[in-house]
Structure formats: C-alpha cells, structure tokens
Amino acid sequence: MVILGKNGVGKSTLLKCINRILKVNPGDIEIGGSNIREMDNNELAQKIGYVLQSSQFSDTTVFDAILLGRKPYIKWDVTSKDLEIATDVLISLSLQEYSMRRVNELSGGEMQKVAIARALTQQPDVLMFDEPTSNLDLKNQLEVIRLIKDVVKEKHISAIVTMHDLNLALRFGNKFIMMKSGKIHAIGGMDVFTTDNISKVYDVDVTIETYNGHPVVIPLEGSPL
C-alpha cells in the first residue's frame, strides 16, 4: 500500500496513528484482528516494523544496530535465536561486509538498508516506511524500493509506504491511497491514477502516458513545478 499526497496532508500522521505513536480517538485500528489499543508496546513492536524517514542510530556496529530489532522479544539477555535471526537478515540483505562497520560511516542508501534490516529482525506482520527514498540518489531509490518489494514477497508480509514520487509509486505499489487536506481522496488500485485525481490532490495538471507497457505521469507545461 502506497500513501500519496502533498506535504502536510497527513501521510506521516496516518502512519503514526497505525503505530500508536499518536492516539486515535474515536475509532479503532486492528492488525490481524487484534486491536492495537489492547497491545502492550512489545506486542505492538512484534506486529509492526517502522522505518522512519531519517532513521537514527547510536554509534554502533551494523550488526548491533540490526540486533536491536530483537528488543521486543528480549526478556533478560540476547539468546542464540536472536543472534541467528539477526544474522539471517544480515545475509538476506547482503550486508555481511558491513557487519562490523560503524553505522555512521555508511552512505545514505546503506544506512536505509540497515534500518530495513533492523525492522525485519522484529519479524513483524506489517512494515511501515515513511518516505524511504527521500534524500537518496536515483540508483539508491530504485535499490531500496526493489529491496522492499523483494522482502514483502519473500516474507509474505504487508508494507505501507508514504511517497511523493508518483512514478516511483507506480513501480512499487499495487494499492494506493491519495490524501488531500487530511482525508482520503481516493483509494484503490492503478485505477486511482487518473489525471483528475492527481490534479485535485497535487494542484498540478498532468498527462498519463504509457512507456514500455507502464504508465508514466508527466506534468503539463505551465503547471507549477
């Protein structure tokens, strides 16, 4: 699921409500049939992995940063199972060569992969990403999006992602929410990508062309950039 909309319409706020960082009143949010109001913090962290727009790490190694994802499960000390899960995630994301490097020595794209690995180590049912490609160059944007797609498919879990780039969203998503003024303007599959919806949500006139069998959103000349 990709959440789209201009700055300030409530995309990040919606993620924070799902993750109980912000309280919803009235109303309920359920994950797998369980109300998040009835979960303690560890139970919720076992359900949801949340990757922030700019993930923060202490001055630690990549492996220790990934192992921190096991915190919701650790009662007294790190177990062999925790180490095994963290190692498996490290390998599956091809981060072995970085395992003993300090996180603050990594590039933006590498650091984002570590943030995704940490969230995966929680073994959640849902992964949430707040603008995971912001501040990344095009190559790293595509690598991160491809990584998220592969992880979701391999682990059979759900992902909710906020994005700005419509064409990147079209490459990534199969379901979409378009938000306007704090409300859902449109929800559905590729059918929500109409010139009318995009114009109303972004205040920009566009045309939608097809290239290599894929839709591409193009701003019209004279529209604000």
Image (spheres, rainbow, N blue to C red):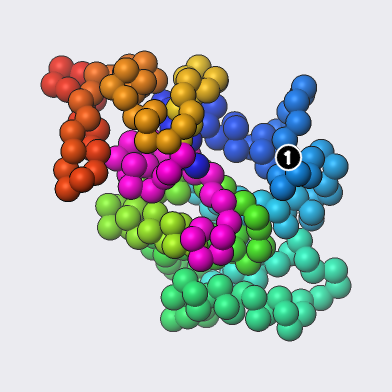
Structural crowding at the residue carrying mark 1, measured as other residues with C-alpha within 10 Å and reported as few (<14), some (14–19) or many (≥20) = few
The residue to which callout 1 is attached is 30
Going by the picture, which residue comes out furthest to the left?
A: 221
Most foreground residue, 161 or 214: 214
Position of 221 relative to 150 (above/below): above
The residue shown at (24%, 19%) is: 205
- The percent coordinates of residue 86 (x first, y second) are 62, 74
Q: Left or right: 32 with respect to 194?
A: right
**Residue 104 colored in magenta in the image:** no
Indicate the amino acid at tag 1: Glu
**What residue is rendered at 49% in x and 60% in y?**
153
Q: Where is residue 176 in the image (x, y as percent from the top left)?
A: 45, 35
Q: Give the range drawn in magenta.
A: 152-175
Give the residue drawn at x 53%, y 44%: 160
* Secondary structure beneath label 1: strand
Pick the front one: 7 or 1: 1
Residue 61 seen in the current view: no
Tell me if residue 162 is in the magenta stretch: yes
Q: Where is residue 181 in the image (x, y as percent from the top left)?
A: 50, 17
Please state the horizontal and vertical placement of residue 22, each as a whole percent of the image.
70, 33
